[in-house]
Image (spheres, rainbow, N blue to C red):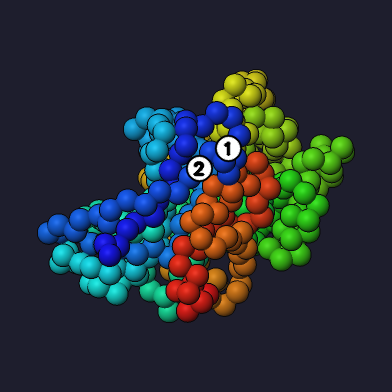
Amino acid sequence: MTQMNTQVVLKKPLQGNPSAEDFALRDVAMPTVKDGDVLVRHIYLSLDPYQRSAMSGRHMSADGPLAENQMPSGGTVGQIVQSRHAAFSEGDYVLHHGGWQAYSVSNGEGMRTLDPAKAPLSTYLGILGMPGLTAYASIIKLAHVQAGQTVLVSAAAGPVGSTIGQIAIQKGARAVGIAGSDEKCRYVTEVFGFDACINYKDAHYLDHLKSALPDGADIYHDNVGGQMLIDAMGCLKDYGTVILCGLISQYNDPSRAVNLPVALPIVKRAVMKGLVVYDFEDHYDDFLDLVAPWVKHETIKYKEDRVDGLEHTGALFAKLMNGQNFGKALVVIDPEEDIHHT
C-alpha cells in the first residue's frame, strides 16, 4: 500500500474568530523527492498568532488569502527520512517551514540542522525558535535593555513575552507583564520571575498597572496593539522606547482596530521601532549562544500548550486565537518520537 501524507486544510476561508470546525484532515500522495531535495517527517508543528492574518492574506509572508482545501503554512521540527541534498543527511533533525502536515519536501532553503543534545527539540519552535529570536531582537538588538531599567511586556505568558521579560531580568532589569488571567499572572511572577503581572481583564486593571510602574516603564514591548498599546504608552517614561511587534487584538477581525492617538507618542517623546523577526535571521547563532545555555540550565523557563496528533490542530489554533492557550502552542505530530526528545 502506498504511504500517504496527512494534511490539515481549511474547509472554507476564515471569517472572524477561528473554530475547530473550520479545519479538516485530508490524505494526499507523498511528495516527490527530486535531486537537491529532502523529505522530512515532522515531529512538531508550531502554531502562532501571525498565521491567522496569513490565512486571510494580510501578513507579509502570505501570497494571498487561503481558499477552501488549502493548507496553512507553519514552522516545523522534523527528521530527514530521505535526502538527495548534499548539505543534509538522512537522520538529521531540522527546523523549517514545513506546513500543517505530517511530511514535507524541501530544497533546503531556510532549513536549519538542529542539535537535540543542546536542548529539547520542541524548544526550537518556541523559546529557541522564532518566538525566542523575536524576543532577543526586541530586548537586545532594538531596545538595548540596561541594568536598572523597567521593562513592560504584553502577552507576558506567551513565548515571546515571557522570554523578553526573562532576558531583561538576566540583564539586570525589572520586568512587569500583562496577561489575560490571574492564573497566567501567577505563573509569570512565580515561574518566569517577573516583578509583577497585571490581568488586563480585571476591573481595576489600569490602576494596578500604574501601581506596578510607579516611575513608569523605560521599555514597552507590544504584542497586542489597540487599546492595550494606548494604555501601556500612558505608563511609559518620557523618552521611553516602544517595540511594535504584534497585533493580536485585530488578527481575527481588523475592523476592531483601535488606532493610537498620534499625540501620545509626541507627548511622551517616545522612540518607536517596528520589529519584523525576518530581519534578524542572521543573528540566530548569536541568539542561540546567549539563550540556549540559560534554557539548558533552567535559568530561564518556558511553558508549552500541547496537543498530540494533527487531528487536534484546528482546536488548538482556535484556542490560541481566542486567548485561551497558556504557553507556546505546539502540535506533537509524532508522540513516540517526542518521548525521546523531551
Few, some or many residues within 10 Å of mark 1 (<14, 14–19, 20+): some
Q: Quadrant of the N terminus?
A: bottom left
Of residues 35 and 189, the one drawn nearer to the viewer in this rendering: 35
Residue visible at 55% across and 71% down? 294
Q: Mark 2 against mark 1, which lies toward the viewer?
A: 2
Which residue is found at the position 47% from the left and 32% from the top?
12
Q: Which residue is mark 1?
A: 18
Q: Above or below — where is 313 with respect to 44?
A: above
Q: Secondary structure at mark 2?
A: strand
- Kind of residue at disc 2: Phe
Q: Is residue 261 left or right of residue 8?
A: right
Number of labels in the image equals: 2
What is the spatial separation of the Cα atoms under label 2 and label 1, in whole angstroms?
Answer: 9 Å
Q: Nearer the viewer, residue 227 or 166?
A: 227
Mark 2 or mark 1: whose residue is earlier in sequence: 1
The residue tagged 2 is 23
Q: Position of residue 42 (x, y in %)?
A: 39, 62
Q: Is residue 46 above or below residue 213?
A: below
Q: Is residue 42 above or below residue 17?
A: below
**Camera-nearest residue between 307 and 304:** 307
- Using the rendered image of the protein, determine whether residue 73 is visible from the camera's viewpoint: yes
Q: Secondary structure at mark 1?
A: loop
Residue 100: image location, x then y, percent: 42, 51
x and y, in percent, of residue 308 in the image:
54, 63
Q: Residue at x 78, y 56 (%)?
A: 183
Left or right, 68 with reference to 184: left
The amino acid beneath tag 1 is Pro
Percent coordinates x, y for residue 337 in the rendering: 45, 74
Question: Based on the displayed image, in which of its 4 quarters is residue 84 positioned?
Answer: bottom left
Given contact means CB atoms under 8 Å apart, are the residues at marks 2 and 1 in contact? yes
